Amino acid sequence: MDALVSLIHGFGVLADPANILYMFIGITLGVLIGVLPGLGGANGVAILLPLTFSMSPTSAIIMLSCIYWGALFGGAITSILFNIPGEPWSVATTFDGHPMAQKGMAGTALTAAFTSSFVGALIAVLILTFLAPLVASFALKFGPAEFFAVQLLTFCSFIGMGRESPFKIISSMMLGFALAAVGIDTVTGQLRLTFGSTELLRGFDFLIAVIGLFGVGEILLTMEEGLAFKGKIARINPTVVWETWKILPRYWVTALRGAAVGCWLGITPGGATPASFMSYGLAKRFSKNGDRFGTGEVEGVVAPETAAHAAGTSALLPMLTLGIPGSPTAAVLLGGLLIWGLQPGPLLFVEQKDFVWGLIASMYLGNIAGLIVVLTTVPLFAAILRIPFSIIAPIIIAICAVGAYTVHNALLDVTIMLIFGVIGYVFKKLSYPLAPMVLALVLGDLAESSFRQAMLISNGSLTIFWSNWLVGSICTLALLMLFWPLISIALGRLRRGRMAAPAS
Amino acid sequence: MDRQDEQHSPAVVSNRTMDIVVAVLLMAVGTLVMWDSWRLGLTWGLEGPKAGYFPFRVGALIFLSAAVTLIVSLRRHGESGAFVRWDQFRLVLQVLIPTAVFVFAIGYLGIYLAMALFIAFFMWWQGGFSLVKIVPVAIFVPVALFLMFEVWFLVPLPKGPIEQWLGF
């Protein structure tokens, strides 16, 4: 099979010792980032992105994606030991993970979490390996209208599937688009929304926004509860690992379901966070031990972790093949690709085979390496969190400031980062979701130019969006997603009406 | 989690108030976007949609969605919960204000010196550490970052008087 041959070629690219080194550095940094609050997956990748400008794109993305895996693993450590989710997608892991730690089963919980993550990611990578070239060849049929339709689907899914008020989601998303529009318009060369300021000519960079929203904002939020990290001690020794591995296969159904949910939500952008919650909810409903969830059930850890990792990994599929990121971190990686001059899409698979398959190969190895790294270094990372917050917090903020500065060598960016930090803090507290804003910021220009090109082709008529079966079906799906909450309410009423009738 | 604390410390502002404030601000932003787009042209030019076409609709959506949130929030009565309590707010400000000063100082002192002072200040003020413990950390972190960025990655960071004096 073509895909296997390319994959083996990819492993060849990976075999370069420098790349292997970058892989391990990436994973270690990633776990550290996942463990520390304020440096999240998206944030950490954003900060380290400018550093990779001196590397070749292949090495750079290998390291960055390994940071991503590391962060996926690391988030579970703080969730279980400290009841503090290191990442948004680790929140669901705290539900059963921390109670397990409190019962003295921290080692079991951690092993279960890491192994589930590994399984979830592995399944997703397998799907990615075989599906990616298919989607890529399929994507050649995509014209501007189709691209816009997919982006529309992305954004409508956020509105339809989000748990927050749809109007807040729309506000947040549109704010992202507005911020993306600031600066020079690529088509006409006119200045938009700069109000005469030369500094704003550059526009708002999504990296600054991410570092501010997710980094500084997170620290401000954490500060509310005070500075203490009270954590449980964890000992992972081979015995615990082995024992846990013996009982895990019992939950294969949960794991598979979690992986399926994760892959679905990674590809149709939702991301790791909704995936973890959905998987937890489903497991709770369908499991025999459902009512014991929340008291420390292993299954309650398996479900969200498989889903979160599967989603995080499969979010790269639409990112590579269509240029649609499935999660905020994938959005940052996408931004990185664009900065390096690589155009995601079908041509990427043809013109940059080394890059793509090196990356996919690194996902396999990165996962294995990640599992080994976390299983062996948990006590070390737990110890880091014992460092008083009064030392860690300023260091994290300083690193964020450095990260913000290195993007464009602009001092103003650091101030903008701070402003975004406050925005992130306020928005999170008022339930304005941040992910749509970031996605809109990254994709805004692309979406707009797709739309304009499509309009040019159709001479101003919106019917181009239903002109062929491909774009039409995507648009219909988008509208379906957009109005899903209304539709499901209507369906629910219908069902109840039908059920009530025979009874009476 | 100490939920009893909620009764002890009053709220700075309620969720409902903040919702209203943010909604109004967003409506203002939306209006701004629409206004600027109007200047650029909303409809079709020679090469297709004018520069203001897309942003105008975006601004309109911001305005409308924020307006709905505003109406919903205005109509909400009853306990909406505290947006932030005073004890929490104090803690947040304790990070926010030094950070703002730090960001401001970068332009004048260079990032390394500003960082050293920031870390030192924080450790002293929040952690109550003695000078003996503060100085090594406050020196180590900027130096480590200096080596990492300036030397290894060759990425220049803003420098101030001390670095210039040292010849960088």
Image (cartoon, coloured by chain):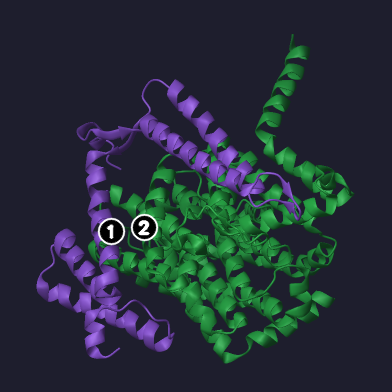
Chain colours: A green, B purple
Towards the viewer: B23 or A213:
B23
Does the image show residue A339? yes
Q: Can you give x and y, in whole percent of width and height, for residue A67 in the image?
A: 51, 71
Towards the viewer: A87 or A503:
A87
Residue type at mark 2: give it.
Leu
Query: In the figure, residue A69 lies in which quadrant?
Result: bottom right
Query: In the figure, residue B117 lies in which quadrant?
Result: bottom left
Residue drawn at 73 percent across, 47 percent down: B44
Q: Can you give x and y, in whole percent of width and height, for residue A402 in the image?
A: 37, 71
Instruction: Please tell me how crowded label 1 is: few (under 14), some (14-19), or many (20+) other residues with Cα within 10 Å.
Output: some
* Residue A48 in the figure: left or right of residue A149: left
Towards the viewer: A285 or A223:
A223
Which secondary structure, mark 2? Answer: helix
Whole-angstrom CA distance, mark 2 to mark 1, is 7 Å
Quarter holding the N terminus of chain A is bottom right
Q: Which chain hosts label 2?
A: A
Quarter holding the C terminus of chain A is top right
Residue B100 is tagged as: 1
Residue type at mark 1: give it.
Ala
Residue drawn at 58 percent across, 36 percent down: A166
Residue B83 vs A361, above or below: the answer is above
- Asked if badge 2 and badge 1 are on a common chain, one would say no
Residue drawn at 50 percent across, 69 percent down: A70
Towards the viewer: A133 or B99:
B99
Residue assigned mark 2: A418
Q: Which residue is farthest top?
A: A504
Q: Which chain hosts label 1?
A: B
Q: Which residue is farthest right?
A: A468
* Residue B164 in the figure: left or right of residue B44: left
Residue B24 vs A116, above or below: the answer is above
Residue drawn at 54 percent across, 56 percent down: A182
Q: Marks 2 and 1: CB-CB under 8 Å?
A: yes
